Image (cartoon, helix red, strand yellow):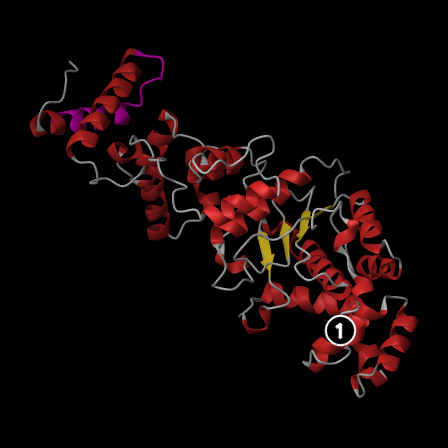
Amino acid sequence: MNIRPIRNDNDYNEALHALELLVSADPASDSEDGDRLNVLATLIESYENDCYPSTLPSPIDAIKFRMEQADLSPIDLVPFIGSRSKVSEVLSGKRPLSLEMIRALESGLGIPARVLIKKPEDGGRFQTWSDTLVKAMNRLGYFEDSSYDGRNKESLLAGFFSSSVNNTAQLAWRKTDQRISPRTDENALVAWATHIESKASTVHTIEYRDGTVNLDFMKSILKLSIYDDGPLRAQKMLEDNGITLVVTPHLPKTRVDGVTILKDKKHPIIGLSLRFDRIDNFWFTLLHELAHVSLHLNNDSVFFDELEDGLGININDMEYDADLMAQEAIIPAAKWEISPAKIIPSPMAAQSLANELGVHVAVVAGYIRYKHQNYFYLKKIVNDTNTGVRHLFNGQFA
């Protein structure tokens, strides 16, 4: 087969036919036919870019469209791409398709090779990102030694996401795992979770053992709430059991309280924003995220949670179950049923129950307010300025 420049549509159609024959022949990548296939693919791509710049979808769009048609999940692509991590990298645009992948996807899923050889278009990927968001990321140290100068947005963001340890961003928008407002800036939320994962990668912990976090574990960690430095003690206790807790402020146009990252079940990650600088918010959010670790460790997911503002958000069964487990860890349902606080939400009732359980009274007060669905109750206890948490975490909330 002679390979010559593609000058017109007849040449183009002949080249496509030749490409399909070569792909079907499945030549070795280091053979003469393998070289011909690569050269032919380059010629076809160049001609399409010149003459049909918007005719073909990107390879990633084509793969995702085929997945939707056939109701496939990412794990179904493993036989064609090679591993779950490779699938994630390909779908995120971080790994180009190899010749072997193109062959497998064409023969196995029927995606034309001429579509798969097209290079993904990365230019302008971050153009729509808000300057306000990038400035906030810069201020909070997301870009490490680099800084935003108003002109380098795309290079900064590309570098930031390319250094993501486990590709958290690729799981961040699985719709079943969200508990967030539709007003939330998706870019900001994904950036926040990726930053948490990056910070967690610098913390060395033992491997987490499945089953460590249960109701008794959650109750024992809540008992640390009586100490002034209880949140720091909790962070250390979690690290000693293989769980990394990262505390970092939320970004503009997000109302996220917490996130649980379960990409690696041997190293679960919990992130808290401390959006509300209150003891009750810290401990309930922490317990809710720990419930995700206990209940959903094998889900390979990222769970975002707006717990304070989330009352009007429809939640799925996994979020509902995490809520119930967190509530049970604070005050067992059987004890709540016979508690005077269920009838009279007074400071005395809250303090008595807190003393009985051995936890901070603000945690109990927050629970009472939630159960009564009245946030005017016990405001003095909950909003006491001496019960803040942010000051414990390295001054990053100043």
Snapshot quadrant of residue 285: bottom right
Residue 24 lies in the magenta-colored region: yes
| Left or right: residue 74 compared with residue 240 | left
Q: Quadrant of the N terminus?
A: top left
Residue depicted at x 57% and y 50%: 301
Which amino acid type corresponds to the residue marked 1 in the rendered image? Tyr
Q: Which residues are magenta?
A: 14-31
Residue depicted at x 15% and y 32%: 51
Q: Position of residue 91 (x, y in %)?
A: 43, 40
Q: Position of residue 338 (x, y in %)?
A: 84, 84
Q: Position of residue 81 (x, y in %)?
A: 43, 34
* Residue 241 against residue 349 in the figure, above or below: above
* Residue 305 or residue 10, whichever sits in front: 305
| Left or right: residue 124 compared with residue 222 | left
* Residue 262 against residue 347 in the figure, above or below: above
Q: Which residue is mark 1?
A: 367
Looking at the image, can residue 332 be seen? no
Residue depicted at x 27% and y 32%: 113
Q: Main secondary structure of the magenta part?
A: helix
Q: Secondary structure at mark 1?
A: helix
Q: Position of residue 370 (x, y in %)?
A: 70, 76
